[in-house]
């Protein structure tokens, strides 16, 4: 292991992340309501191979073993999400106590072995009944999310101190409502824009409610931030890259820090934004304690406005290293985005809430799973995190995506992101070599000798 990795501060948080729909299974057990992902994955043609999260990693039944596994791996923190329809099967109103108990026991078990829980309230599994009433594009959703945040933080706030409201609202809004690749599978840009606003508003409202129930809460939101670079220095490519940056990154970052929606993107959308009501932008800009960064790759943008022949020749190409998702391995992008968050946005604290890679892992004849490419991916990204901290960026922790191979949304089980291999026939878990390496990194960084 490189010396580089030894020098994280002693209080740096080392964890892994998962999400409810991707691992739990038990989709209709113990009073759980249907989610938009249940509906979507049960609709033929929506998910590769017809895969569903009905069973997934069966974590709902195997959570005790999974906590033991996390302990064995020396993890210090666990970021997981709560399935809204397990808590409020009708979206609001009657609380399903069995659902609360499930997460409550999980939290107790984690604390017992010294693993700090980081709870995400929404990682994409909206109660289907709420989608039937309009879903995120409808303003009523804000009240229901606030109620959900209230119920969960009253139940867990005595023990859970780290809260993330939303995971990747860009994906919920635009991939779900405008590209149609995620639940609920719609293709209406106007709906997607309204959804993004109601997601942000829900975040702002929930922050206050959670703080009320849990005054010492460490509160944040997790965004997918993908730095964009023009494919050439041409004006057309630079314009295009600024636009994609605005659409994916600034559309969420700017209103969260009180700058409102970026005007260039508002203009390009050409929507009236009539759903933005007085006071909304202040609610959205409520100060939070941290920003969660989910980083996987960068984007290289070529303009569509002019033909390739009329444009300047490309100067930026993706490197040769590409993951199973067809994503370029580009560690420097993480350093770049971290620097920007600190120097342009003055973000006071950052956690890397997701970072990882899918590769086609296989069990070797000796029963082990060797994943050198993932190990190298994680290592090089951690080095960038360290470099960022050296220029003053306040990164407080790192969560590898993911603990387990799991249901990778539209790709089903075909993409393995886990540091632990899952045999989906037997549900056997096998820590990959990346998990063993990560364990060592955590251990060495937790030694007293480390400053
Ligand atoms: C992120 C999601 C996470 C997982 C990774 C690969 O966008 O938050 O659930 O699917 O991508």
Image (cartoon, grey):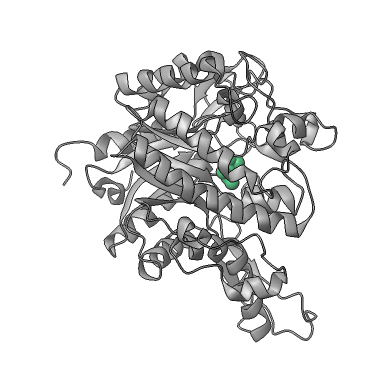
Q: Nearer the viewer, residue 115 or 96?
A: 96
Q: Is residue 43 above or below residue 422?
A: below
Q: Answer whether residue 405 is visible to the viewer in this image.
A: no
Residue drawn at the location 74% of the way across and 41% of the way down? 184
Task: Give the image quarter of residue 14.
Answer: top left
Most extreme residue toward the front, as rendered?
A: 278
Q: How many marks?
A: 0
Most extreme residue toward the right, as rendered?
A: 44
Taking the image in four quarters, ligand 1 sits in the one at top right
Q: Answer whether residue 132 is visible to the viewer in this image.
A: yes
The picture places residue 84, in percent across and down from the top left corner, at 57, 30
Q: Is residue 319 above or below residue 140?
A: below
Q: Nearer the viewer, residue 117 or 1?
A: 117
Q: Nearer the viewer, residue 48 or 80?
A: 80
The picture places residue 405, in percent across and down from the top left corner, at 58, 30
The picture places residue 54, in percent across and down from the top left corner, at 69, 22
Residue drawn at the location 76% of the way across and 74% of the way down? 304
Q: Quadrant of the N terminus?
A: top left
The picture places residue 413, in percent across and down from the top left corner, at 68, 31
| Horizontal side of residue 349 vs 131, given as left or right | left
Residue drawn at the location 45% of the way across and 42% of the way down? 164
Residue drawn at the location 33% of the way across and 40% of the way down? 217
Q: Is residue 188 above or below residue 118?
A: below
């Amino acid at each position: 292991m490189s010396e580089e990795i030894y020098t994280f501060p002693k209080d740096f948080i080392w964890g892994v992340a998962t999400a409810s729909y991707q691992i739990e299974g038990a989709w209709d057990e113990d009073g759980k309501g249907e989610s938009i992902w249940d509906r979507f994955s049960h609709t033929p043609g929506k998910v590769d191979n017809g895969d569903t999260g009905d069973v997934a990693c069966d974590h709902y039944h195997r959570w005790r073993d999974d906590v033991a596994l996390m302990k064995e791996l020396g993890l210090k923190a666990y970021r997981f999400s709560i399935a809204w329809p397990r808590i409020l099967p009708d979206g609001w109103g009657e609380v399903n106590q069995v659902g609360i108990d499930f997460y409550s026991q999980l939290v107790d078990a984690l604390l017992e072995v010294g693993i700090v829980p980081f709870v995400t309230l929404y990682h994409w599994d909206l109660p289907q009944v709420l989608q039937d009433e309009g879903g995120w594009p409808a303003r009523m959703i804000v009240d229901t999310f606030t109620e959900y945040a209230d119920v969960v933080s009253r139940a867990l706030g005595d023990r859970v101190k780290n809260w993330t409201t939303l995971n990747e609202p860009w994906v919920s809004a635009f991939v779900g409502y405008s590209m149609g690749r995620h639940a609920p599978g719609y293709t209406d840009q106007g709906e997607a824009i309204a959804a993004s606003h109601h997601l942000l508003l829900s975040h702002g409202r929930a922050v206050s409610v959670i703080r009320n129930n849990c005054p010492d809460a460490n509160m944040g939101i997790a965004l997918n931030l993908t730095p964009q670079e023009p494919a050439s220095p041409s004006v057309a490519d630079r314009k295009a890259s600024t636009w994609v940056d605005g659409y994916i990154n600034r559309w969420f970052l700017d209103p969260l820090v009180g700058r409102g929606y970026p005007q260039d993107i508002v203009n390009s959308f050409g929507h009236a934004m009539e759903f933005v009501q007085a006071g909304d932008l202040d609610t959205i800009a409520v100060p939070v304690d941290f920003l969660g960064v989910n980083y996987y790759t960068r984007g290289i943008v070529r303009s569509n406005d002019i033909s390739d022949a009329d444009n300047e020749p490309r100067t930026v190409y993706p490197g040769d290293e590409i993951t199973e998702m067809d994503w370029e391995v580009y560690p420097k992008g993480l350093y770049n985005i971290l620097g920007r968050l600190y120097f342009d946005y003055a973000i006071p604290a950052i956690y890397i809430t997701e970072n990882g890679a899918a590769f086609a892992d296989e069990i070797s004849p000796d029963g082990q799973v060797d994943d050198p490419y993932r190990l190298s991916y994680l290592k090089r990204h951690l080095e960038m995190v360290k470099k960022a901290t050296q220029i003053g960026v306040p990164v407080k922790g790192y969560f590898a995506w993911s603990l387990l191979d799991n249901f990778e949304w539209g790709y089903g089980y075909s993409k393995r992101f886990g540091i632990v291999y899952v045999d989906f026939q037997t549900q056997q878990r096998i820590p990959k070599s990346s998990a063993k390496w990560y364990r060592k990194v955590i251990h060495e960084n937790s030694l007293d000798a480390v400053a």
